[in-house]
Amino acid sequence: MIDLVETEHQDFPFVNTIALDGPAASGKSTVGERLAEVLGFLFFDTGVMYRAITLAALEAGVPIADENACAALAETTQIDVQSPSVDDGRPNDILIDGIDKTWEIRTPEVDANVSEVSAYPGVRRALTAQQRKIGQRGRVVMVGRDIGTVVMPDARLKIFLDASVEERARRRHVERVARGETSEYDEVLELLRRRDQIDSNRDVAPLCAAKDAVEINSDHLDADEVFELVLNLAQERELE
Ligand code: CDP
């Protein structure tokens, strides 16, 4: 079990760490999970935390527009990531205050509200602190929007994975249909455009590539090709 609140100090922060950033549905999780498995690193998807706080707000009836209340939730909500307890395609169990919410954090309602919640400085402060503690343990592939720029600015390898919004919408739509969910391509596209807009233009930790990140556009690359590229980069930097 990964207790995200647990602290473990190391003298040299962010040794053996990979920061993998990019917009929604750019394929970060797919490549990050494979990379972590091959290297024997922890895979840590920070988007899960922003989704968990958004879900907690929706369930508690906290208005998404109430910045202070959302920040207070981020300070007090316990998010745990554990090995999967059910064989239903989940990479992990996601527990919010001890209750399994693995699939609930992926609903269209959370998708539609998560970028607003993520833009609040108080929410980011609370979650960034927890993410750094995980990074300081080393041997982690951390995935998000601001990992190379803010959370682990000293990461050994930084990747910025991008693709056109149309291609990302197509992938997300196919994913949803494969899970047996109803999905309309045009709606997925519109929502991604809106989330990109908020994620890229917020004042605190906006989505952008770190100066020293390797930028990969995956419009014309399949998942295997992206994985090979990223694995080569990790090996060049002697991550192990
Ligand atoms: O899976 P998908 O790419 O749709 O999104 P995600 O990685 O689960 O992240 C959900 C949302 O959380 C993003 O749209 C961002 O608004 C926010 N996020 C963030 O602000 N910073 C991060 N490090 C990770 C996610």
Image (cartoon, rainbow, N blue to C red):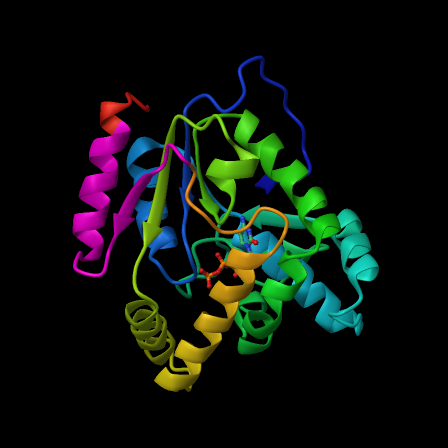
Left or right, 191 with reference to 223: right
Q: Where does the image place residue 149, in percent across and percent down from the top left?
A: 50, 37
Q: Where does the image place residue 213, in percent across and percent down from the top left?
A: 36, 36
Q: What residue is shown at x 60% (from left), y 65% (from top)?
A: 114
The answer, for residue 161, to whether it is visible in the render is: yes
Image quadrant in which you'd find residue 7:
top right
Magenta stretch bounds: 211-234
Say if the magenta span includes residue 227: yes
Q: Quadrant of the C terminus?
A: top left
Left or right, 4 with reference to 177: right
Left or right, 73 with reference to 105: right
Q: What residue is shown at x 30% (from left), y 45% (from top)?
A: 34
The answer, for residue 183, to whether it is visible in the render is: no
Q: Quadrant of the N terminus?
A: top right
Q: What residue is shown at x 35% (from left), y 77% (from top)?
A: 173
Q: Where does the image place residue 40, in percent across and percent down from the top left?
A: 35, 32
